[in-house]
Amino acid sequence: MQSFFETHKYLLEHLGTPVRRELINEIDWNHRLIGVKGARGVGKTTFLLDYAKTHFGYDKSCLYVNLNNLYFTERSIVSFADEFRKKGGKTLILDQVYKYPGWSKELRFCYDNFDDLKIIFSGSAVMRLVDQNPDLKGCVAVYRLDGFSFRENLNLATKSKFQAYSLDEILQNHQAICKKITSKVRPLAYFNDYLEHGYYPFFLEKRNYFENVVKNINLILEIDISYLEQIELKYLPKLRKLLYAIAKAAPLQPNVSRLSQEIETSRATVMNYLNYLKNGRLINMLYEDSESTKKPSKIYLQNPNVYHSVMHGEVSLPNMNQTFFLNQVSYRHQVNVSKKSDFKINNHLEFHVGDESRLNNPLGEQEYLAHPMLEVGEGNQIPLWLFGFLY
C-alpha cells in the first residue's frame, strides 16, 4: 500500500492549479458512496485529485487509486479498502472503476460493511449506475462532470472569477449581467476559440488539440462503448461511419432506413448504435416530447469541439452555434425540438439561435433569441455566449 501513497503524493505535487469546477460545490461530500460520471477527456481524474488536495492535502487519511493498475488483477477492492481503513484511512478515491470486474458488488459490500469509510469513484459516461445497476440501488449519489463551460474556460483565459447564473437569472437580468462581465473582459474575443478548442482540458496541454480530441473520440468508441456495451471490435468501422454521417448532416433529422443502408446494418442496430454514441457523450438526440424509445427528431454532435474535430474545421457556423447552445443548456435543463423555434426548453421556453431575421421581428412572451454577435442584449434578445455561464 505504501507505493500507492507515494503515487498519491506525487500526483498531488504535480497537479498544479487546476480550474475549480463548479461541480465541486454541488456534491454532498458527506455521502459515503459518491460516483462521478463523465465522458472520457473531461477531466475526472484532475477533478478527484483537486478534491483530495483541497480537503486533505497530504494527509494519509485520503488515498487516490487508479483501478487500471495491474495490482488489482489479484487484489480485491474489498480487501484493499479494509486494509486502508484499518490503517486509519477515511476517504478512498477510486479512478476508472469500470476497469475492475465486479466493481459494483464490491462497492456495495464496502458501503454495507465499512461504515467508517467514504468511497468516491469515477466512471465512464456509458456506465449504468442507478437505473440499471441493482447493486448500487439506494446507496450511491451520482453526479455528472461535463467539459469546461464557456465561463470556466473564460475564467482560466482571463484569470477571472465570474460566477455561474441560473437560466431564470439570465432571462430576467441578462443585460445587467452582461454589462458586469463586459466591464472586465470582452467575451466575444474568446468565444470562437472556445468553440474550436475550449471544452476539453486538452487546451491546457502543449500538444495538438484536435489530434487529442480525435484520439479521445476513438478511445470512447474503442474502449468505453465497445468494452462496456460488449461490441465486437470488427463492428467499430460502422460506429465511426455512423458518427461521421451524423457530423456531415448535423443537425440530422434521422432516416433510420437510409442510415442502416449507409453503414450496412439493420435498423435495430442503428438505433442501438445511436444510443451508444449518446451514452458515450458524442451526440445529443432531441425529441418532440419527453425522451422515449422512439427515434429522435434531431441529432447534433455533443459539443462544438467534437463537431470541429470530426469535420476538420469544415463546419457550418449556424450549426456550431446551435451545438454550443444545446450543449450548455442541456446540462441542467430539458431540451426538445420545437415547431416554432430551434429549441424548446423546459417544455415552455422557445429559443431561436442565431436567426438574423428575428433581430427586427417581435418575439413572444416566452420566446427568445440567442444571438452570437451580441455583446449586451436587450429585451428577449440575449447574447449567445451568456448561455455558457449556466455552470
Image (cartoon, grey):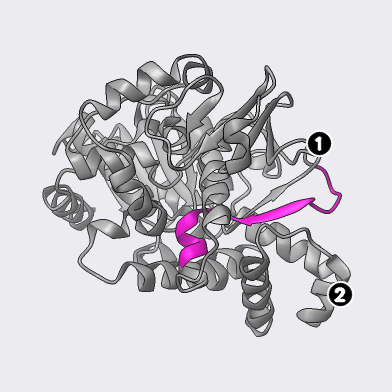
Q: Residue at x 56, y 23 (%)?
A: 380
What residue span does the magenta drawing correspond to? 292-308
Pick whichever, 329 or 251, lies toward us.
251
The answer to whether any part of residue 90 appears in the image is yes
Tag shown at residue 289 = 1
**Residue 300 within the segment the image draws in magenta:** yes
Residue at image location 34% in from the left, 40% down from the top: 92
- The quadrant holding residue 360 is top right
Dot 1: few (<14), some (14–19), or many (≥20) neighbours within 10 Å?
some
Label 2 packing within 10 angstroms: few (<14), some (14-19), many (20+): some
Tell me the amino acid under the disc marked 1.
Asp
From the top left corner, tell me how far across and down residue 64 is, in percent: 29, 47
Query: Residue 64's mark?
Result: none
Q: Which mark is residue 266?
A: 2
Q: Position of residue 255 (x, y in %)?
A: 84, 65
Which element is circle 1 on?
A: loop
Query: What is the residue that sits farthest to the bottom in this orientation?
Result: 234
Left or right relative to 187: residue 382: right
What kind of element bears circle 2?
loop
Relative to residue 371, is residue 319 depicted above or below? Answer: below
Which residue corresponds to the image point at 28% horizontal and 46% vertical from the top-left? Answer: 189
- Mark 2 or mark 1: name the one nearer the start of the chain: 2
Q: Is residue 220 left or right of residue 206?
A: right
The picture places residue 185, in percent across and down from the top left corner, at: 23, 34
| Quadrant occupied by the C terminus | top left
Is residue 152 depicted above or below 103 in this figure? above
Quadrant assignment, res 18: top left
Q: Nearer the viewer, residue 271 or 314?
A: 314
Q: Nearer the viewer, mark 2 or mark 1?
A: 1
Q: CA distance from mark 2 to mark 1?
A: 26 Å
Q: Is residue 167 magenta?
A: no
